[in-house]
Image: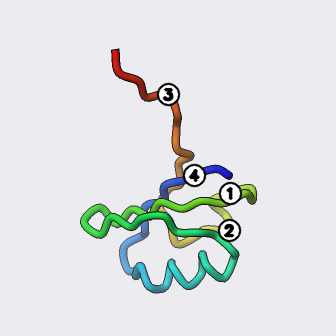
């Protein structure tokens, strides 16, 4: 399962986004209200065309490490 971050467009509410994501069978992990960022998990292919309520979508990277 892959994890993604999406930035909600102005004029859209988290409630609306939550309803649409759960309707697609996507699990919401976390919501950051001050930044309007939603962290979600899915096994499906993610394209911005399906998620027109986000400004941008980024896949979570696992390249963070401490030296």
User: If you read the primary sequence from the N terminus, does the residue marked by circle 2 or circle 3 appear first?
Assistant: 2
Q: Which residue is mark 1?
A: 46
Q: Find out whether the residues at labels 2 and 1 contact each other: C-beta distance under 8 Å.
A: yes
Contact, mark 2 vs mark 4 (Cβ under 8 Å)? no
Decide: is 25 above or below 60. below
Q: Nearer the viewer, mark 2 or mark 3?
A: 3
Q: CA distance from mark 4 to mark 3?
A: 14 Å
Image vertical order of residue 22 relative to residue 41, above or below:
below
Q: Position of residue 12 (x, y in %)?
A: 42, 80
Q: Secondary structure at mark 3?
A: loop
The numbered mark at residue 50 is: 2
Picture residue at 48% right of the left edge, 64% below the top: 29
Q: Say which residue appears at 60% left-offset and 75% top-offset.
A: 21
**Quadrant of the rendering where the C terminus is positioned:** top left
Q: In the image, is 8 to the left or to the right of 24?
A: left
The residue wearing badge 4 is: 3
């Amino acid at each position: 399962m892959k994890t993604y971050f999406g930035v909600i467009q102005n004029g859209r509410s988290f409630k609306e986004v939550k309803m649409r994501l759960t309707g697609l069978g996507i699990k919401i992990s976390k919501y950051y209200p001050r930044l309007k960022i939603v962290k979600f998990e899915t096994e499906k292919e993610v394209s911005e065309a399906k998620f027109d309520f986000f400004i941008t979508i980024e896949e979570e990277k696992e390249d963070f490490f401490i030296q």
